[in-house]
Image (tube, grey):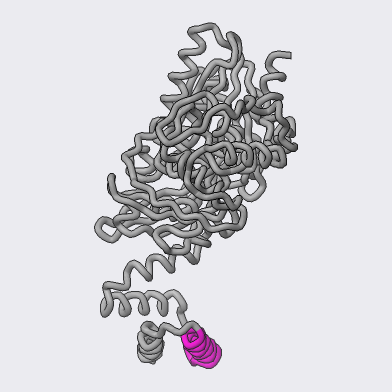
Amino acid sequence: MKKRFLAIILVLVMAVTPISALAEGEASYNLANALKNYVDANYKYEMDDDAVIDFLMKELLTRNPELFEEVASVIMESLDEHSKYYTKEEFDEFFAYVESEYSGIGAYLTSDGEYCKVTGFLDGSPAEKAGMLAEDIIYKVNGEVVTGLDSNAVATKARGETGTSVEITVLRDGKEISFKIIREKLNENTVEHTLIDENVAYIQILSFSSATGQEFTDALTQYKRQGIKKYIVDLRNNSGGVTSEALTAVSNFIEKDKPLLNVSNKRTGEYTYYNPRYGEKQELVVLINENTASAAEIFAAAIKDNKAGIIMGTKSYGKGTMQNTLSLGDFGGIKLTVSEFFTPNGKEINKVGIAPDEYVANVERLATAEDFEPLTYEKKFYLGDSDPQILALKDRLRVLRYFGDDMDEYFDATLDAAVKGFQTDTGLYPCGDLDFTTQTFIQNLVLEATVLEDTQLDKAYEYLTK
């Protein structure tokens, strides 16, 4: 009797599978659900929901093995927002990204509600050279609307074979702008660093990949040998990555056997990860903002709770879960949330974030002439030219959100595209040349624009040098 009921449900599922109209699909689901509830309430014997689901999946996939990807995707979508199913191609690309060796457009992405936005670029990346800017919202990839997808899913769609092209459509100030970008092989260096002065080193961690811990340790060791004792570690716009690499990096600043992380896991229960290394406390400021997430929050929390430095900036994103990956061979793989992590003092991170010790927000203000190198209006500039005035014009176009952060004195193809876009939007003839009329329009409009002062970095430096 029970088996006949399960077979009836299976027939209903099979019947609605090919229905494409949403209304009909919802009606079929409602009918099947009502039938299940009726049987559950009136059936003489106990109804086992797990057995029903198991039977449905077995029969459905036995008869229609091609539906595995759809079934697996639905299972993972029913979980939290960070659990996901990947096809084989997507899974291979995902691992290539984690290892920081892949072909793509070279943009850092983060999820922002329903949208995915650009937070930065690899140096000389195809995306930046094509004219994409930080804060652009990714709207379409090859014509497919990607609203609602997380940053990993959007990044996977943007990646592909070296030399192939991908069309990325962004929303910028409410307008759709499309870029045709040639993918390049990217070997990402996740740590960038420089000396601000003879006493203060600045180290930026862009993301946490499988090599980040060693890259960070190498940079720190280099500066220690030079006698540097004051550090600014910039985790702003770092969306996370490999948890173990964040622990390796932060362990450099924390004494041996001090707690770095608390973890809650269904299989192993709750446990604390202690520093196995001999870290050394330094004069340290760690910068965070609303896009600092996941593994980057682990780093910040370990510093904060161990009082190994000052956390400065704005409250972080609040992703306090860890995911494991499982390969399904030719059937792809999954990323599954298996743990929740907490600060060394046991405070929640997930959907809460890390509050800075000193709240500092970057300041927006109207641009002034003093913010830029003066324009002389002595020369017109064309594609292929090189001149310090071109750098001055690029800087103005950057503030007007027509150009990225790749500042130099060369009139390259990226600048040509930016100038044409500016000319089109301002009613000028889109020739791409920096003639005197275009230079004047750029100067007049930039003095009506707002500039963002990096108050956070200034305050961090001031804190270390006051």
Which residue is found at the position 45% from the left and 51% from the top? Answer: 152
Relative horizontal placement of residue 425, taking residue 89 as reference (left or right)? right
Give the x, y percent position of residue 82. Answer: 50, 54
Residue at 53% over, 29% down: 379
Q: Quadrant of residue 302?
A: top right
Segment tinted magenta in the rendering: 23-45
> What secondary structure is the stretch in magenta mostly built from?
helix
**Which of the 4 quarters of the picture holds residue 125?**
top left
Residue at the spot x=46%, y=41% of the render? 416
**144 to the left or right of 37:** left
Is 406 situated above or below 416?
Answer: above
Q: Position of residue 80 (x, y in %)?
A: 53, 59
Asked if residue 199 lies left or right of residue 357, the reply is left
Number of numbered tags placed on the structure image: 0
Q: Quadrant of the C terminus?
A: top right
Residue 293 appears in the picture as rendered: yes
